[in-house]
Image (cartoon, helix red, strand yellow):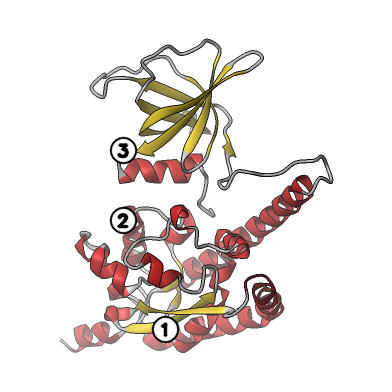
């Protein structure tokens, strides 16, 4: 009974031997990263102030260990009144609340750096499920099976779902991934590895995004050529991807596929060597090859419903723009994970 009572009071950690060891580990690591990242925090703060104005930091209530509320800090990446606008919804592109600099910070996860202060305070650990807004929990997450298992441990600065899924992944899928972390018995090697791996991914992503941003700026300002970008959503080029389509929702065998050229959150472009005839297809299956693993070819697929938006006659192919919508939360996740490639790792 005494041991069970002791376990129930342990904050943050997955079956830790002692609470003291966990706190020492997180405090020492947070201090090291604060010293290393202090110049970067100063630079980002200055850029946020110059580009987006005040406030530089966002602070909001999150649910921690045993659902205890705490104040979490981030660099501001949204319009100042964004939380009142979106309410109990999940942030989506349609809200158009992300600032230009904020998109870069969110994509690279650099907006999370101020949470090192939360680690020092003991609100969160380095490793654990990401903390949730109370309003989102009440309206969306409280109905998800086993979601409350995350409250058995301290939330974390780094979590499975944060690393391996896009920002706007369905909560049910993120719950399945996070619960694997909750079930994992914590060992020092895993913690250190997860932190170093995340650091490597963040640095790599930051450098790639910066290089891409510089190239885009030079391109749109006419350094390479006179060009004005009109698209609000970036199209992701696809290699070796196919589109299969059919008209009837109950047709078990789709028609022959065509090439998937590029895709964004609202539409995709496909190319066919022959013209399509009406009636236009209404149901689509996107398929992409991810290479071989253990001698087997890995493919990922998702199903969508859509409408033909535009037909373009090219020099040697017919191009079709399709506005689409995934048919389920799982298919939504597949689009953002494997076709839009929004996951940081």
Label 1 neighbour load within 10 Å: few <14, some 14-19, many 20+? some
Task: For mark 1, give the secondary structure.
Answer: strand
Q: Disc 1 versus disc 2: distance between alpha carbons?
A: 26 Å
Camera sees residue 52 = yes
Q: Disc 1 versus disc 3: distance between alpha carbons?
A: 37 Å
Of labels 1 and 2, earlier in sequence is: 1
Query: Closest to the observer: 15 or 271?
Result: 271
Label 3 sits on residue: 327
302 left or right of 102? left
34 left or right of 193? right
Q: Nearer the viewer, mark 3 or mark 2?
A: 3
Q: Please give the name of the residue rendered at 44% of the width and 53% of the height, measured from the top-left corner.
A: 94
Query: Closest to the observer: 205 or 42?
Result: 42
Q: Please give the name of the residue rendered at 38% of the width and 74% of the height, measured from the top-left corner.
A: 155
Task: For mark 2, give the secondary structure.
Answer: helix
Q: x and y percent of residue 118 in the render?
A: 48, 83
The image shows residue 297, relative to residue 102, as above or below, that is above
């Amino acid at each position: 009974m005494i041991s069970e009572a002791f376990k129930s009071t342990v904050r943050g950690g997955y079956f830790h031997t002692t609470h003291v060891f966990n706190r020492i580990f997180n405090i020492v690591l947070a201090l090291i990263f604060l010293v290393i990242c202090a110049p970067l925090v100063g630079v980002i703060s200055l850029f946020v102030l110059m580009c987006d104005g005040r406030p530089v930091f966002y602070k909001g209530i999150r649910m921690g260990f045993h659902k205890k509320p705490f104040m979490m800090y981030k660099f501001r990446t949204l319009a100042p009144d964004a939380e009142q606008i979106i309410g109990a919804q999940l942030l989506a592109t349609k809200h158009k609340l992300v600032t230009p600099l904020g998109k870069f910070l969110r994509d690279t996860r650099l907006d999370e750096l101020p949470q090192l202060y939360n680690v020092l305070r003991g609100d969160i650990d380095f490793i654990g499920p990401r903390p949730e807004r109370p309003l989102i929990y009440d309206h969306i997450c409280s109905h998800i099976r086993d979601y409350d298992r995350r409250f058995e441990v301290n939330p974390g600065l780094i979590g499975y779902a944060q690393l391996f899924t896009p920002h706007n992944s369905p909560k049910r899928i993120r719950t399945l991934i996070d619960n694997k972390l909750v079930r994992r018995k914590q060992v020092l090697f895993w913690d250190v590895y997860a932190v170093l791996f995340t650091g490597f991914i963040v640095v790599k992503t930051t450098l790639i995004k910066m290089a891409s941003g510089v190239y885009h700026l030079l391109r749109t300002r006419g350094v390479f050529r006179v060009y004005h970008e009109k698209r609000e959503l970036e199209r992701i080029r696809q290699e070796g991807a196919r589109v299969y389509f059919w008209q009837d929702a109950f047709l078990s065998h789709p028609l022959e596929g065509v090439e998937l050229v590029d895709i964004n959150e609202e539409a995709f472009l496909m190319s066919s060597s022959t013209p399509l005839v009406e009636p236009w297809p209404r149901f689509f299956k996107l398929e992409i090859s991810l290479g071989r693993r253990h001698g087997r070819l890995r493919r990922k697929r998702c199903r969508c419903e859509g409408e033909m938006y535009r037909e373009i006659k090219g020099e040697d192919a017919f191009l079709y723009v399709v506005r689409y919508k995934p048919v389920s939360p799982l298919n939504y996740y597949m689009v953002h994970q494997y076709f839009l490639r929004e996951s940081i790792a």
